[in-house]
Amino acid sequence: MDCIIQKAETLDRAHVMQVVWDDGGESLYPAVWLRDNCQCSDCYLDSAKARKLLLEALDVNINIKGLTFDRKKVYITWPHEHYSEFEADWLKKRCFSRQARAKLQGELFLPECQYWGSELQLPTLDFGDVLKNDEDAYTWLSTLKKVGIVRLTGAADKQGEIKKLGKRIGFLYLTFYGHTWQVQDKINANNVAYTTGKLSFHTDYPAFHHPPGVQLLHCIKQTVTGGESEIVDGFNVCQKLKEKNPRAFQILSSTFVDFTDIGEDYCDFSVQSKHKIIELDDKGQVVRINFNNATRDTIFDVPVERVQPFYASLREFVDLMNSREFKFTFKMNPGDVITFDNWRLLHGRRGYEAGKEITRHLEGAYADWDVILSRLRILRQSLKDPR
């Protein structure tokens, strides 16, 4: 940005500052917000990018005592002679207009979402390139955010490769199954994934109040027959359900469902949570799917008359997931790593035959969206402003 201030003045008895820009645009800034965000060393710790000013010390009815400006800055004197300077670019970025706020929120949270169905062309990158090159790492994470899934090829067919991706983004998400976990047929399995049977569409860990945002699965060994992976864009299916049966959508987005997970692995655990299967934000947009039929509890905390309508709604949702329009099926090869949005995609697996030896082995891990988006913002900034 290279913003130029044409004029700055106070309004509303000096409780608001108006800036007129050289492009003809105007911005309004409340005095209390300006004082709260003073950038001087007494009010702001630049080394931490954090506010030092205490809210207890803020006069919420403050007005501006003196205001001057030049093309690149405004200079404010406050009561009790405190002094603040604000740069033009800094102010313009934080303009309170609807358009400016929407633009900044888009830059911060990257909300763009590309829906897909059975026609998906699976985005694919090289595992080694993602580890070595910032451009490839940025493409990986930005595509993961937009499409919801990226396949990485060329990893070694041994354990430990996923930890390298964890270091690339920052760190992995520890759960009761460990920092990483081995998906293979196990005796006395403590998770249905550790069997050879079919896995229906699900998200992982709705038994957590904050389920992991991203899942990483590395194929180390693959069975000859069976074991295909199945995925579906849950957000796209929700949109279809809302069009086809608004009542079912309303039930699944308003009914709290109990989930549980009890066992022993990394340590012993007894996890319990309540989620709406379709989670909406304050604008009514779907932000997360919480559904795992295996860990959906036998306890169901609803009035008896709401039970059957819930099951009917859930069955319609699941039937849509399994329709040819939405389901995408593929088979992982040794060395493949799939990374996908666990809040958006539901995934499953076709069954395969058990053998005397392990015939299929995946190593899995989780990452948090906060960690992913942090690395994505840092990569974007470094690629835009290399030093």
Image (cartoon, rainbow, N blue to C red):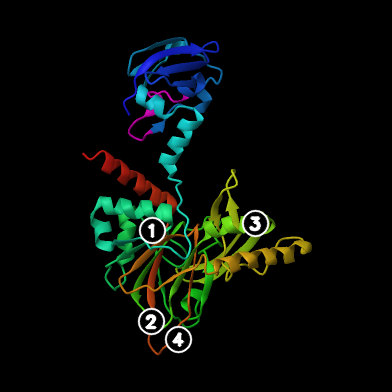
Q: Which of marks 3 and 2 is in front?
A: 3
What is the three-letter code of the residue carrying label 4? Answer: Glu
The answer for how far apart the CA atoms under marks 4 and 2 are is 8 Å
Q: What stretch is highlighted in magenta?
A: 35-49
Q: Earlier in the sequence, mark 1 or mark 4?
A: 1
Q: Which residue lies furthest to the right in this view?
A: 305
Is 225 included in the stretch rendered in magenta? no
The quarter of the picture where residue 120 lies is bottom left
Q: Which of marks 3 and 2 is nearer the N terminus?
A: 2
- Asked if disc 4 and disc 2 are in contact, CB closer than 8 Å, the reply is yes
Q: Quadrant of the C terminus?
A: top left
What is the three-letter code of the residue carrying label 2? Answer: Thr
Note whether residue 345 is visible: yes
Query: Which residue is depicted at the point 23% across and 40% down?
Result: 386
Q: Mark 1 points at which residue?
A: 172
Query: Which residue is depicted at the point 30% across and 53% down?
Result: 137
What is the three-letter code of the residue carrying label 1? Answer: Leu
What is the three-letter code of the residue carrying label 3? Answer: Phe
Q: What element carries label 2?
A: loop
Q: Mark 3 points at which residue?
A: 249
Q: Which of marks 2 and 1 is in front?
A: 2
Q: Name the residue under label 2.
A: 223
Is 41 included in the stretch rendered in magenta? yes
- Asked if disc 3 and disc 4 are in contact, CB closer than 8 Å, the reply is no
The answer for how far apart the CA atoms under marks 2 and 1 are is 27 Å
Q: What element carries label 4?
A: loop
Q: Which of marks 1 and 3 is nearer the N terminus?
A: 1
Q: Is mark 1 on a helix, strand or loop?
A: loop
Which SS does the magenta portion mostly show? loop
Q: For this view, does 353 lie left or right of residue 123?
A: right
Q: Name the residue under label 4.
A: 353
Q: How crowded is mark 4: few (under 14 residues within 10 Å), some or many (20 or more)?
A: some
